[in-house]
Structures are given as C-alpha cells and as structure tokens.
Image (cartoon, rainbow, N blue to C red):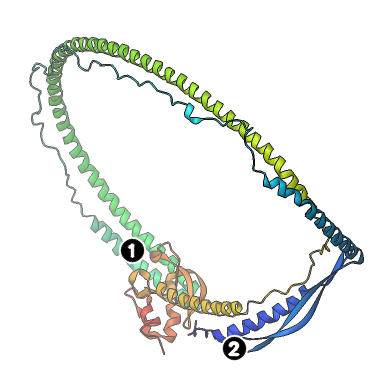
Amino acid sequence: MGKSKAPKAPDPRETAAAQTSTNIGTAIANGYLGNVNQVTPDGSLTYSQTGTNKWTDPMSGAVYDLPTWTATQTLSPGQQAIKTENDAAELNLSKLANSQSGRLQDLLGKPFNLDGAPAAGDPSKIGLPQYSQYGPGPNLQTSLGNAGNVQSTIADAGKIQTSLGNAGDITKTYDYSADTSRYENALMERMNPQLAQSRSALETQLANQGLQPGSEAYNRAIDAATRQENDARFGAILNAGQEQSRLAGLARDQAGFRNNAQQQAYNQMLSSGQFSNAAQQQQFGQNQAQLQANNTAQQQKFDQGLASATFGNSANQQMHQNNQTQTAANNALKDQTFNAQQAQLAAQDQARSQYLNEQYALRNQPINEISSLLSGAQVSNPNFVPTQGQSIPTVDYAGLVNQDYQNRLGAYQQKQAQSGGLIGGLLGFGGQLASLSDKRAKKDVKKVGELKGHGLYEYAYRGKHDDGKRHIGVMAQDVEKKRPDAVSRRSDGMRQVNYGALFLAGRKK
C-alpha cells in the first residue's frame, strides 16, 4: 500500500470536440444506411445526394461537410393512369356540384319555421313541495324520589393486635476463624520446588531436542507444562478450601439451631395474636352484614323508582317516534308528486327536440348531397414498407472518458479510504496505542495483507489473553527487525507494538 496519486482529470474542451466529431461521423453514416431506395407495384421512392453544407464547430473551430438529400416518389404506369382519370372525374363532379349549388340559394333563403313544433315544458307550472315540520321531543322524567339514606359506617368491632412480644435475637453471623492460608502455603511450599525442578528438566529436555524458545513445538510443550502446574496449584487451593468449608459448616449448624429455637417462640406469639385478630374480624363481619342488608333494601327501593321512571320515558319516546314516522311518510308523498311533474316536463322537452332534429335533417340533406359530389375518389399512393436499414449507435465518447476518470478516481479514493480505515482500526484496540503483538500469545494465525511494508495477520489470542474475538495486526517479532523503536516488553515478558509510533508519528519519510 504505497503512496498513490489521484488521476488527472480529462480536458473538457478536448473531450467535447472528440465527442462532436464522433457524433457527426456516426450521424452521416446512419444517413447513408437509412436512405434505402424502395420499389413497389404502385411506385418507387428514390434518395439522392444533391449537395453538401459546411458546418463549423464553435467549440473547436473544426469544419465539417454535411450532405443534403432529396427523396423522389414516382407512381407506376398503372397508378399514374388512374390518377389522370381521377383528376378528370373530380373536375366533372366539381362542375356538377357547381350547377346544383344554385338550389341552395332558394333553400337557405327561407327561414327555419318552428310553428309545428311541440310546445316545450313549462317549469313555472311545477310547484315545490311544502314539507311538514317535525315536532319537538317529549318531556322526559329526569329525577327520582328519595329512596332513603345509604349506611356508610360499621360499628366498632374492637382493636386489632398489631405487635408481638420479643422472641429473642436472631443469630446472623457465625465465627470460623480457621486460617486456610496456612494449609495452602504448606501445600505450595512442598509443591513449588518439585514444580520448579520439573520446569527446569523440561527446558533442558527441549534444548537437548534442538527446540528453541518461540518455536511452535517449544511453545506447545511449555504451554502443556504450565497447565499441569496450574492444575496442581488449583488442587492445593481446593484442598484448603474444603477444610475451610467443613469448619464453616459446623459453625453454620450451631447458628441454625439457635435460630430455630427463636423461630419457635416467635411462631407461638404469632398464633396467639392471630387468634385475637380472628375474633375481632368475626365481630366486624357481623356488623358489616347488618349494614349491607340495610343498604340492599335501600337499593331495591331506588331500583323500583328508576324502573318506573324509565317505563314512562320509553312510552313518551315511542309516541314521539310514531309522530315523526307519520310526518316523514307525508313528506315522501309530496316528493313523489313533484317527481311525476318533473318527468312530464322532460317528456315534453324530448318530443320537441325530436321534431327539431327531423326538420334539421330535411334541411341538411341537399347540402350533404352537393358535398358528396365535391368529394371524389383519390388515387392510391405507393405503400412503402418500413425498411430494416442498419444503424450505427452514437458512441458516448465524453461519457466513456468521464467514466474512466471516475473509475480511476474511485479506485484511488477507495484505496485511500482502506488505508486510512485500516490504520484507524489498528489504532483502536480499546483506545490503546500499544497492543499485545507477541507471536507466543497468538493462535490460528493467517496472513491477510501488508500495510506500509509490514505484514498484517488475522489471529485470535491464546490462553488468558483469549477474549473470544478475531483481531488484525502485526507480529512483534517481525516489526522488531525493522522498527525496534516501536516494540517494547510488558511486565510478563511478552512483546507489544506501539501502532501510533509504527504507522503515524514514527513512520519513515
């Protein structure tokens, strides 16, 4: 991904001149291809070039010779003879129409007489219907008499017990002061020399086998030994934790016994309080039942008064609806009479219109006959079929030039965006410029490209560094050979790369 330059934009004047030249050449060629001479049984059509016109391009100053064409149509001998006879027949018909046109002077000189026409309908004789108005609604009962007072208070049934005596304190903590760390330390002191001896023996064995630190086989062996050491340490921690759990269980059982005794005393006091409150609740229920009986009687009286008022209102409403229905029926009869009068008026107008149309037809018949004499038959022109002439499409030269420029410019911009995006992604890493890049901390490594002379790899972290994700970055060992200033050591001995120093601040000119 070396530094690239943006492509040079095309010259608009040169592109326009080239496009004009291409379009004119294509148009002239299409003119030659499209001017196809045709010969039919009724005649022929012939194209011939009769000259040229010069045209100067105002943009480039170039002069072009544009051909001019003439299309000549010739009838066949038979059709030409028909045309001659038709011309003679049309002349005779014109003379006959001229002599008959004298009749029109007498016909058109008489005014059009409407004395015998039926009379038109008279809208003034139709009167608008007089509708009956709807009556007002009935007076309805809107209030009820007093049905008695509703009882809303219940007699006092006694006090409710709301507190209990003290049943004793609850044991919330229990003490187990066993020092589990001494068990763990004792196991570790016994185990660590053996583990160190085993690690030293393994490194000696690997060295004797010719395996160097950093190689894949060496890393696998060290990784397996590390897991075994961790398993041994975890076993020691679990044994110490089990002893601690046993002591904690004894203390927990003792505290549970004390709390059970306290719970028993509390339950007895709770049962006594609940018995007292149950008696109070029974007395309250009796008082409430008496009050509900009184309110039920009052509700019954109120419902009877409401039903009586509802019945009266329903009867009044029914009588009002009967009156409204009768009024609507009377108005409908008036509408029917009005519609019948309108239909009679329309029938009179239709009869008058039919009479006038017949009179107009009689008056126009002589005029139409003379017009027919003036319109003679025409000769059949040659029926030229559409030709399948070849056509050369216009080349969009300017479009091709601009498209090529846009493609090259887009590729350049995409390359710049990919380079910038990749650097931005490498500098992400949770906001840290320095990232763990040691080969020994990576697995499933696959090379995906290069950036500014450094190989880029896709990988996942191994062991405690594994975050379950795939990453893209460089290898610290590779970078250290070219840019040792961008590589540093972590506290655990692993190499890390400062991507800011590698690709931005510390990049070479």
Given residues 129 and 203, the one toward you in this image is: 129
Given residues 445 and 394, the one toward you in this image is: 394
- Relative to 95, say whether 292 is above or below: above
User: Is 369 left, or right, of 202 in this rendering?
Assistant: right
Quarter assignment of residue 250: top left
- Relative to 421, say whether 307 is above or below: above
Q: What element carries label 1?
A: helix
Residue bearing the label numbered 2? 60
- Residue 127: percent from left, percent from top: 45, 26
Given residues 5 and 274, the one toward you in this image is: 5
User: Is 91 left, or right, of 254 in this rendering?
Assistant: right
Q: Quadrant of the C terminus?
A: bottom left
Tell me what residue is drawn at x 25 percent, y 50 percent.
Answer: 244
Q: Can the viewer see residue 52 in this picture?
A: yes
User: Is 330 left, or right, of 361 in this rendering?
Assistant: left
Q: Does label 1 or label 2 sit earlier along the sequence? A: 2
Tell me what residue is drawn at x 58 percent, y 30 percent.
Answer: 119
Kindly identify which numbered label has been placed on residue 191. 1
Three-letter code, disc 1: Met
Cα–Cα gap, marks 1 and 2: 95 Å
Q: Can the viewer see residue 498 in this picture?
A: no
Three-letter code, disc 2: Ser
Q: What element carries label 2?
A: loop
- Relative to 36, say whether 56 is above or below: below
Front label number (1 vs 2)? 2
- Residue 225: percent from left, percent from top: 42, 66
Quarter assignment of residue 249: top left
Quarter assignment of residue 377: bottom right
